[in-house]
Structures are given as C-alpha cells and as structure tokens.
Image: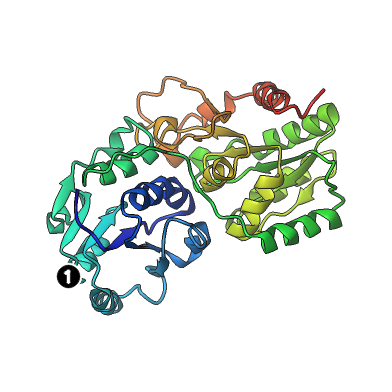
Amino acid sequence: MLNAKRILITRTDRLGDVILSTPVLRAVREVYPDSFIAMMVRPYTKECVEGNPYINEVILYDKYGIDKSISSSFRFALELRKRRFDLALILHPTNRMNLMIFLAGIPRRVGFNKKLGFLLTKRLPHTKHLGEKHEVDYTLDIVRAIGIIPKHRSLYMPIKKSVQKSVGETLLRHGVFESDRLVALHPSASCLSKKWPSKKFAILADRLIDKYNVKIALIDGSDGKADADETRRNMRRDVIDLSGKTGISELASLLKRCVLFISNDSGPVHLSSAVGTPVISIFGRKDPGLGPIRWGPTGRYDIMLHKDVECERCLAHNCDKDFLCLNAIKEDEVLEKAEAILKRNRRLP
C-alpha cells in the first residue's frame, strides 16, 4: 500500500462521469482515513462533490473557460505544485490533464495509458472502448492498481437541506403536495442517437397520468429544452415543466422526491441512481464503449431498455435506419416497466 498524505483525484468531464466516480472517493478514504483528499472537477460539476464526506476539498479546473489556454493551464500546474500532493489518481485521461499533473510535480501519478500516458508513473491498459464492464468498475480499477480493494460501488450525491426545501416550495407552487406521486421524465440527451422520440415521451406521460394518477415533471438542461417543449406540446394532460430551471443540486433534490425517473441515456440517470430513485433508462447505440453494459443505471431496481436491431456497425448520429433501435422500444414496454417499479415500491394499489 502506498504511503500518501496528500491525494488528488481528477475527473474533468461530465455530470454522469463524475457521479459514477464517487465510489473511488469512498474507497480511498476508507484506506487513507487521515490523509488530505482533494477532488478536481470542472465548475459545472462541482455540486456533485461539494459536501461529499470522503473528501476535504474541491478544486475547480475550468478547461473551457479561464483555464482553457496552454499558458493558464501551465500556471494552474504551478499552483498545484505548491499544494505538494504526493499521489494523483487520474480517472479520465486527457493530454492536458496528464501533462498538467506531471508539471505539478506530483511524484506518483496513476491513470490509464492513453493521451500522453507515458507521463504517468503507473499506467493501466485503456480498454474502456471495449465496454466489457461498467464505468464504475473501470474507475475502481485505478484504486485497485495501488492496492486498494473497494468494498462498495454505490454512487453518492450530496443533498442540501436548503435546496431540498426550496425544491419542495417550487413543487407546491405547481400544485404538487407531499401525498402526490411524482414521476420525472428527461426526453433529451447529448446526441440524436440517444433520444427516444419526444412524441413517445408525450404518449407515455399521458398514459402514466391517466392510468396511475401520478404527476409528471419534465426536466432538461437549457441546451436541451427544445425536446422538453416538444414533449409538452404533444401531451393532452398538464405537465410540470421544470426544463432548464434546475441546477445539479436542485435536480438531485427533485429526483429524490420522485417515485420514478424515466430518461434517455444521460447524466441525470446516474444522479437519480445516486439519490436512490428508481430509473428506467432508454438506450439506443450499441457500440460496446457507449452501450448499456458500460453506461447503464446502477441502482438495485433500475431498469435498462435497449433493442439490438442487428446493425453491423452503429453510425450514431449519422444513422441511416432512422434510429430503428430507439423506435423499436414501444410505449407499452416502458409503461409495463414503470408499473413494475411503482408496485415494487408500493406506490400503487
């Protein structure tokens, strides 16, 4: 086991990736209870780890903002050097991160052998593109490489009481009371090849309301609000439109309040798993490195829906089959899975 008093863990990509890396924080803390542990993330994902009990500090690296230039990253590395970290665990390999950690003079640097991987002192083979296991397990391989045997793989998302109260007040203004069963839908995603049609989400939402007397909340980031708008326009019943109106902390509290979350393959899926709300996650792409084996939801009662329509090769957003894999998933199937989850959680008669 390495002797490490000051440990830096880095993950500078997106929301879901950071949430899926949180088991690493617990694994490291359990072995190094007295060490100083810092987590480096991008500013927009800081709420995923602020308040995490397994770390001492959150360090922000704004790779698309003030730290974008080579010179600013060099200055960032010099500031890191002053912090005298003796171990760095790099969970997401990039050229800049591997170089910056090297320039920061951190003597032990552990990560995947990709993107200037020769700058690391301990390199793991990079096989994520093969999708042979879940992203959680790929990240935990980093701690296994330094002799840590992880005991847990559950995700963690801090819930702030003040935010929880604020979200509750917002829901009350929309007519959602404590006795109401709330289901959230997320009809957007980062790529067309991940988007189940908005019209199908609309049909599903109406049927959930009609059959189970639930209330429906639409969520989405501001960049994907068009998908939520289209879903709302195609619905017969009223919906609570919170698309573009929730930050990460607000979204976590909202999902914790829900009895079910139905979503395309996206970061909020893992946020929901982290707060313990069952998820139905809809997948399209079949590429091993992008598919459900690596990126599916991790909760005990979570469900993944994916249809293999026997494409020889997935063309992603350039699909020439009109996204047959997504269209093959019918509203009835999702409705059936939703009922199973709701009954298991005793939310239906």
Locate the C terminus by quadrant: top right
Q: Which residue appears at 16% of the width and 56% of the height?
A: 120
Residue at image position (42%, 19%) is 310
- The colour scheme is rainbow
In the picture, measured across the screen, residue 136 lies left or right of residue 162, that is left
Q: Position of residue 220 (x, y in %)?
A: 63, 52
Using the image as rendered, state which of residue 328 and residue 7 is in the foreground. Answer: 7
* Residue 79, horizontal then vertical, whole percent: 28, 78
Q: Name the residue under label 1.
A: 105
Amino acid type, mark 1: Gly
Within the image, what quadrant is residue 58 found in?
bottom left
Q: Foreground: 8 or 304?
A: 8
Residue 247 vertical placement versus 214 (above, below): below
Q: Is residue 155 above or below residue 54?
A: above
Residue 284 position (above or below residue 88): above
Image coordinates of residue 191 in percent, x first then y, are 49, 45
Residue 32 visible (yes or no) = yes
Q: How many marks?
A: 1
State the image coordinates of residue 181 (x, y, percent, origin top left): 79, 38
10 Å crowding of disc 1: few (<14), some (14-19), many (20+): some
Pick out the residue farthest to the front: 34
Q: Quadrant of residue 20?
A: top left
Left or right? Give the position of 302 relative to 41: right
The residue at the point 37 percent across, 32 percent down is: 287
Outermost residue to the right: 175
SS under mark 1: loop
**Viewed as shown, does residue 329 lie left or right of 317?**
right
Decide which of 245, 101 is in the foreground and name it. Answer: 101
Residue 245 in view, yes or no? no
In the shown orientation, is residue 239 left or right of residue 84? right
